[in-house]
Amino acid sequence: MTHASPAHFLILALVLLTAPLITNAQSGPAQSDLDHSGAVATGAADAETSVLSDAPDQVEERTPAQRPNEPEIAFDPAHVGLPGFTEPRSSADDYAELLALIDARISELEAEVRDPDRGDSTERSQDPVQDARIALLGELRTAVQRESVLAARLRELNGALAESQAAAEPSEPLDLDLGVEPPYPLRLLDELRAKRSLAEHAREDAARLRSQADRRVAAADRSHEAAVRERRLARDRLAVARDQAEGQASARPDIATLERELEVARLAVLVTLQERQSAQVGAALAEREDALAAARLVRLQTQIAHVAGDVVFTREALEERLGEIQAREEAVRADIALLVEAGDAAELALFQARRRLGLMSSDAADRDRAQEQVLTREAELAAARKGVEYLHQAVGLAGSARTLYERRYALLQGEESALWPTWLRETQALIKDMSDESAFAQAELDALRSMQLALARRLARADLGAGVEQAIRERVGALETQEERAREMLLVKDQVQSLAQRLRDQLDPLVSERSLDQRLDAAKLQLESWWNTELFVIQDHGIFARDLVTGAVVFTLVLVLVSFLRTLLRRTVLPKLVEGPETERKTARAAVLALIRNTNQVFVLIVAFYAAMTVSGLVQGHLKVWLWTLLVVAIYVQVGIWATAGLVDFVQRQRSKKEQQDPSAVTGYGLLLFFLRVGVWIVVVVSVMAHFEYPIAGLIGALGVGGIAVAFAVQNILSDVFHSMAIILDKPFKVGDFVIAGETLGVVDSIGVKTTRIRSISGEMVVMSNTNLLNSTLRNYKHMRERRVVFKLGVVYQTPPDRLERIPKMIEEIVRAQRFTRFDRAHFAAYGDFSLDFEVVYYVIGADFTLYMDIQQAINLAIYRKFQEEGIQFAYPTQELIVRRPPGELGRASA
């Protein structure tokens, strides 16, 4: 049986893709010797004209199944010197005869060029029509040769396909043609699978070739139609010229030229027709190739299914494979050592070349040569280093191949079935990696090839110096060496990828047919593998999946535990705190509420994060120290929050208690809370600094200097603030007290941090700074229990002494007669300028000023009535004028 090899597909693709570019080599030398002579009889044009009405041009579509040699032209090929061109061709002899005919016609035209009787040879060699005819005949010969090759291949494939179809008949016995008896070795199975892979690629190539062949047939049809139209135009031009030239001998040369142009157009029709027939044969060939590849693929699949059921891989065979890999690995390591030495030598040569370049003179040619030598040494060094890299990759791939063979052995022995799913995933990942690396290696090869082509173009220049050319050739050699090593590396990768694909093909059906226990074991192993998987690295510390899971679990547990404790305190502890003494209940309840309400969520998250990172071991080194620092700061801050909340609760309860008794406590406790908060956070900051052994003394000194500067800037404000503290602590007055401060008197309305507001007797609000208020003499009437009253009264000097003696008694009786009074004394105190003065002292029991005025009014009225009854007159300022005269004036006055 004959089978198509991959080389056949490459030949077919090459022939189809390069068809438009191939020209006959024989036409080249003859083009310079053509002349203007016509090669056909004058009657050819008449024959063309005669068939114009009876045999019009027809271009009909043909499928690859039709005979490609049927005539599709409206003229006799003999008119162009090719009689019998359109006769059917079915054998190699037919094609050989046609090629001989074309060669003979080419020889005739070339002989015309060399004929000395046809005039100047220079003019003949410059005849474009003569050149075109020979060139078209060369293209026609190439097209016929191509069809001959394709037809021979088509006949061969038809025979192979017929044999394949006959072997596939159900009535025929199955002939596997394996060459060995079962049990089959693993190597045979690998070979069959490799052949199947080639067959799959071959079928894909055949499908692409069919598509290309169909496009080529369509293009050939369009070219043929265009050539036929051009022939018609040439024929019409000749007919018009003949009609116009009847009876004119001078027009004969123009007609001869038009006749040769018509011959060229006819040859173009034959060329396009032949190219169309070749394309149709190529399409039929691509179809047969596809069918044969499909049949071969079916046969290979049958063989693989048969061999896979009875394959054996012995321990000896495994050891043999591993020994081959080991030997290959040792050879690669030896090559690595050699390449390392070569790389060192290339690096030294590069250093010397660069040094020479630096010392080079200013001559341009010398510098160009030295620069090219530097580039060459760089290429040699890159080739050596890349070669070492490729060989190291080969060593790694050898390890992968060793693992793949060991797994195939275990798979065929039925061992370690729980690991098969893991092996399948790893094998699929390896295949993907190999595919990506192969694509990258292919890209490197393309880049190297581009560099070589660029250097080849430079070498084609004629102006290169000898030294520059030699350096470029050495550079090309280095690139070729690197390319060769890259291709070897690509081949190794393809081999490992093929081996991985074979293992995957074996694992796929076995993994899908596992039992439940095997699946559970595989899941357990998969979980263990995932649990110990290193995900990434931070500061040279591997982070595993188990660390992340442990951290997440601990983090969640801490959050849940804190939430549980809050709920427990709220629902269990708080109700039990109702029992016990009042003070203890309130204090304990306040502490619990402070823990519940004032535990910051950020603090909880920091604690949970630290616990998760520490337990899981995710943090190491400096990161752990930083995290511990963050936790300490968070703890101190949270303690400050708790302390502030506790103090606020305590002060608020005290405030509520005192507020009913003393309304002024509202302002006082507000200031107290402010200073308590400041004090708590100062303690927190100092504690944090002391924990981390920060030099607090220096900080306090710096703050002291800064505090002095700030104090000078805001000394008035600070003075008022501290005086407000003095008012709160000393309590010289409170809200609602009637005070007199300097010239201001009124009721205290509010006490602030900086000012105190007093509602004056006249109604306006007087705002005084705390400093000025305390610096003035302050009289507070709010806390007065009794009021001492001193008043005076005077009687006239004409009052008799006995009445003067009764006046103190009268006043005492009047004062004692009043309620809420306590008499102290009443005395004749002094002789006044115009009165005898009495001083009275008594006390009003109470601080009410209105009560005092009422009592004083009653006393004054009673005294007035009593003095009226006793005939005692109140003294008031009077002046008595006494005029004295001398005695003599007195006598005269009487006379």
Image (cartoon, rainbow, N blue to C red):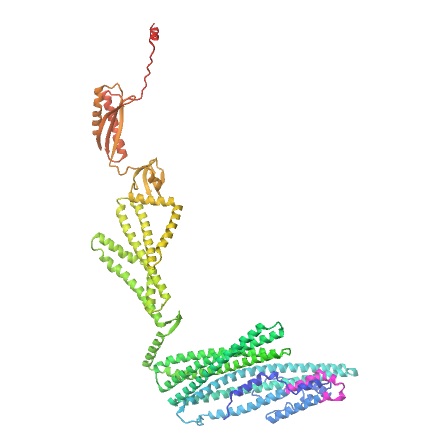
Note whether 757 is above or below 814 in the view shown: below
Q: Pinpoint residue 628: horizontal percent, then vertical percent.
A: 34, 63
Which residue is the extreme one toward the top? 895
Count of number-bearing discs: 0
Note whether residue 160 is visible: yes
Q: Is residue 817 visible?
A: no
Residue 721: quarter of image: top left
Q: Is residue 140 above or below residue 350?
A: below
**Direction from residue 885 to residue 132 in the image, left or right:** right
Q: Nearer the viewer, residue 741 or 687?
A: 687
The quadrant holding residue 172 is bottom left
On screen, 865 above or below 84? above
Tell me where residue 340 appears, x and y as whole percent. Answer: 48, 79
Q: Is residue 493 left or right of residue 623?
A: right
Secondary structure mostly seen in the magenta stretch = helix
Residue drawn 26% across and 57% down?
Answer: 592
Q: Position of residue 418 (x, y in %)?
A: 34, 81
| Residue 462 coordinates in the image, percent (x, y) | 64, 79
Q: Residue at x 76, y 86 (%)?
A: 119
Q: Nearer the viewer, residue 495 or 742?
A: 742
Query: Where does the C terminus fall, quadrant-wise?
Result: top left
Is 135 magenta? The answer is yes
Q: Out of 63 and 555, give the one closest to the viewer.
A: 555
Q: Nearer the viewer, residue 396 or 645?
A: 396
Whether residue 805 is in magenta: the answer is no
- When the figure is inspected, residue 848 is found, relative to residue 361, above or below; the finding is above
Q: Which residues are magenta?
A: 111-140
